[in-house]
Image: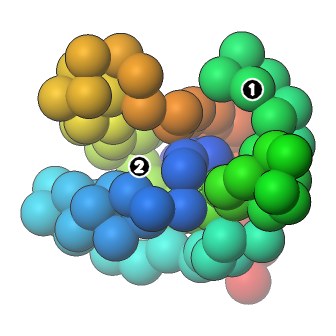
């Protein structure tokens, strides 16, 4: 199993979730438009100087599905000519309960 973390611009969160459901992800947890930070796409702090927020979406899926998630999110980025701030990370996950 893999725990997949997706950090994306808050304005595309619904599209990200729709894509996850289309590929059969059984569930997710999200924090909507509250993630602030700084990275290669600039600052997102929800202020007049650094507008915008990020959302985080977490899901636990079989190993093969995590690869499909990565490919699907890459396709979303390509739709925006690479300008979409979206990052996907995964770590091994043991389901304990």
Query: Could you say which is closer to the camera, residue 26 or residue 32?
Result: 32
Q: Secondary structure at mark 2?
A: loop
Query: Could you say which is closer to the camera, residue 32 or residue 57?
Result: 32
Residue 93, position as x, y percentages in the image: 69, 50
Q: Which residue is mark 1?
A: 42
Foreground disc of the pair 1, 2: 1
Asked which quadrant contains residue 39, the reply is: top right
Badge count: 2
Instruction: Find residue 74 and name its label.
Output: none
The earlier-in-sequence mark between 1 and 2 is: 1
Name the residue at 55% across, 48% down: 8
Quick one: quadrant of the C terminus?
A: bottom right
Residue 43, position as x, y percentages in the image: 81, 35
Name the residue at 12% across, 63% down: 22
Q: Which residue is mark 2?
A: 62
Query: Could you say which is closer to the camera, residue 10 or residue 60?
Result: 10
Name the residue at 54% across, 50% down: 9
Residue 84, position as x, y percentages in the image: 42, 32
Q: State the scheme by which the image is colored.
A: rainbow
Neighbor class of circle 1 (other Cα within 10 Å; few <14, some 14-19, many 20+) is few
Q: Secondary structure at mark 1?
A: strand
Whether residue 67 is visible to the viewer of this picture, yes or no, is no
Whether residue 29 is visible to the viewer of this picture, yes or no, is yes
Please, is residue 89 above or below residue 46 in the view? above
Neighbor class of circle 2 (other Cα within 10 Å; few <14, some 14-19, many 20+) is few
């Amino acid at each position: 199993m893999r725990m997949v973390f997706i950090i994306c611009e808050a304005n595309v969160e619904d599209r990200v979730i729709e894509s996850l459901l289309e590929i059969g992800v059984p569930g997710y947890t999200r924090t909507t438009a509250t993630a602030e930070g700084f990275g290669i796409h600039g600052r997102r702090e929800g202020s007049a100087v650094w507008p915008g927020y990020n959302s985080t979406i977490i899901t636990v899926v079989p190993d093969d599905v995590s690869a499909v998630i990565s490919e699907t999110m890459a396709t979303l980025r390509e739709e925006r000519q690479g300008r979409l701030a979206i990052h996907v990370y995964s770590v091994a996950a043991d389901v304990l309960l």
